[in-house]
Image (cartoon, grey):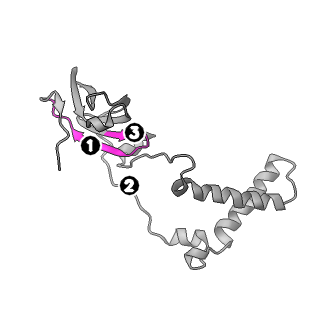
Amino acid sequence: MESELFHLGITYKHSRPYHPQTCGKVERFHQTLKRFLNKQKRARSIAELQAQVDRFVTYYNEVRPHRAKGRMTPRAAFDSRARAAPRKVDHTSTTELRVRHDKIDQHGTVTIRYKSKLHHIGMGRALNGRRVILLVAGRRIRVLDEHGGLLRELVLDPDRNYQPRGRP
């Protein structure tokens, strides 16, 4: 999945557990769902429980007006928005994507092999010991942190052993 998202120009990110900005809305939804289910007659089968959950979801999204959306239902608010779409990508490319999990060494570099030659990518000593994900498509390399945040993007210079960070 990560490689497909990469080809579409989408950065794949995981949320951290108990991180209120990312997980709180889901936890709040579960709390509301549990309150609804506790008021229902106890389901005697998985099918009955699923029917109760389906009724709740329909009400929650299509009937209940949302206070923060001008009293629109969530479905109406969702349907009224313009859809974002991934940029068009040429999928006929023969460049294969490699995903590597690595660790930044004590010198602040990550080592990669390109055409049987080792190259060292400068990341900075401040990142020593940090686990990273390398997305390698030919000479194009993206270095991500464990949560999918972009740390560095570069086009490998095959004539240089060390790939300096450079300063903007």
Location of residue 150 by image quarter: top left
| Mark 2–mark 3 distance (CA, rounded to whole Å) | 14 Å
Does residue 66 sit above or below 53 in this rendering? below
Question: Which residue is labeled 3 in the image?
Answer: 3
Q: As shown in the figure, which amino acid type bears the numbered disc 2? A: Pro
Q: Nearer the viewer, mark 1 or mark 2?
A: 1
Picture residue at 59% right of the left edge, 69% below the top: 74
Residue 86 image label: 2
Marks 1 and 2 sit apart, C-alpha to C-alpha, by 20 Å
**Residue located 68% across and 72% down the image:** 63
User: Which residue type does callout 3 highlight?
Assistant: Ser
Q: Does 47 sit left or right of 68 as displayed?
A: right
Query: Magenta residues?
Result: 143-158
Can you say whether 104 is above or below 86 in the image?
Answer: above
Q: Residue at x 55, y 55 (%)?
A: 20
Which disc, if any, is residue 130?
none
Q: Secondary structure at mark 1?
A: strand
Q: Could you tell me which secondary element the residue under label 2 belongs to?
A: loop
Q: Position of residue 123 (x, y in %)?
A: 26, 37
SS under mark 3: helix
133 or 6, nearer to the observer? 133
Q: Amino acid at mark 1?
A: Glu
Looking at the picture, tell me which residue is in the foreground, 45 or 112. Answer: 112
- In front of the other: 142 or 87: 142
Residue pictured at 57% horizontal, 74% vertical: 68
Local crowd size for mark 3, using a 10 Å CA cut-off: few (<14), some (14–19), many (≥20): some
Residue receiving disc 1: 153
How far across and down, in percent of the image, does residue 47 sit? 80, 49
Q: Nearer the viewer, mark 3 or mark 1?
A: 1
Distance from the alpha carbon under mark 3 to that under mark 1:
16 Å
Which quadrant holds residue 53?
bottom right
Question: Does the rendering let one see residue 115?
Answer: no
